[in-house]
Image: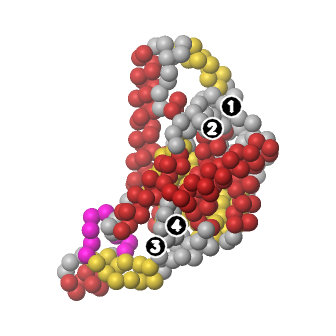
Amino acid sequence: MMSATDSSPARADAVLSRLQLLVTRKLDGLLQGDYLGLLPGPGTEAGESREYRPGDDVRRMDWPVTARTTVPHVRRTVVDRELETWLAVDLSASLDFGTGRWLKRELVIAAAAAITHLTVRGGNRIGAVIGTGPPRDGRTGSPSTPPGVLRLPARPGRKEAQGLLRTIAGTPTRPGRTDLGLLVDALNRPPRRRGMAVVISDFLAPPEQWGRPVRKLGVRHEVLAVEVVDPRELELPDVGVLPVVDPETGELHEVQTADPRLRRRYAAAAAAQRAAIAHQLRAAGAAHLRLRTDSDWLLDMVRFVAAQRHARTRGTTR
């Protein structure tokens, strides 16, 4: 992968200011209506029952009503407005790459900013665990915070949310890849009340590394996976000899992109990789949002939120 970024504090502040301006000016205007959050939590108050529909969460089955009527029913719940949201933010070196309007790292920060905005405007709490790369100096971390992970406690309020975003934006990138499985599992410890968990990553780590922790997370929480993608990760352009630097190892490779067979193999392998990621997320029951560095990420997010709200009004969650 090609690498190009300057993770200086000045650049981080500039990027964050630009993103927050986009979020505050456009997001509220595009998402009209009462506060519903990004993905409303399952709630804690029991509501009325209704008949089961394909796609309903089986964890909400109302077994007494089902037994009495012999027709499957699910229990509606009142959305808990004191929602606690946690972000798992992957800042591996592979995110320091981009050939579109944004670097992938900037898109990660953008997603975090939008989710934070949607969370705190309702008075809810938001916290984060940040993957800062592989552990250094043989550090072992703690049971709740593994090595290579920075934990920011969940707090309410815009001022606290701004501090959280500044920390995310200002976190330096280290060579190597964050263990995404450990990062996600940090959201499972310590156990906390039902809420929302958002995993933001390019998910380039092997799915077998992070699939089980995401499934475990989904047992108790609403899970949203935000996958950040650059178009050059999906297909290669025909530009002759292309020097490619792996940001995680620093190794330089030269790729002859004029070879159509190479481009076809690359595109097929990339499609298979993305399909495997999507399959793993579906198996975990996570909502899946893909953001591209060459597209209007804010519009993509608005469409996603609108679709989620529409699905919930029809009694489905995904």
Which secondary structure, mark 3? loop
Q: Residues within 10 Å of mark 3 (few under 14, many from 20)?
A: many
Q: Mark 2 and 4 residues: CB-CB less than 8 Å, in contact?
A: no
- Residue 198, above or below 271: below
Circle 1: residue type: Ala
Q: Which residue is mark 4?
A: 37
The segment highlighted magenta reads 51-60
Q: CA distance from mark 1 to mark 3?
A: 41 Å
Earlier residue among tags 1 and 2: 1
Q: Is residue 206 above or below residue 69?
A: above
- The residue beneath circle 3 is 42
- Direction from residue 261 to residue 136 in the image, left or right: right
Q: Which residue in the structure is indicated by mark 1? A: 4
Question: Which residue is the site of mark 2?
Answer: 103
Overall secondary structure of the magenta stretch? loop
- Quadrant, the C terminus: bottom left
**Relative side of 212 to 9, left or right:** left
| Of callouts 1 and 3, the N-terminal one | 1
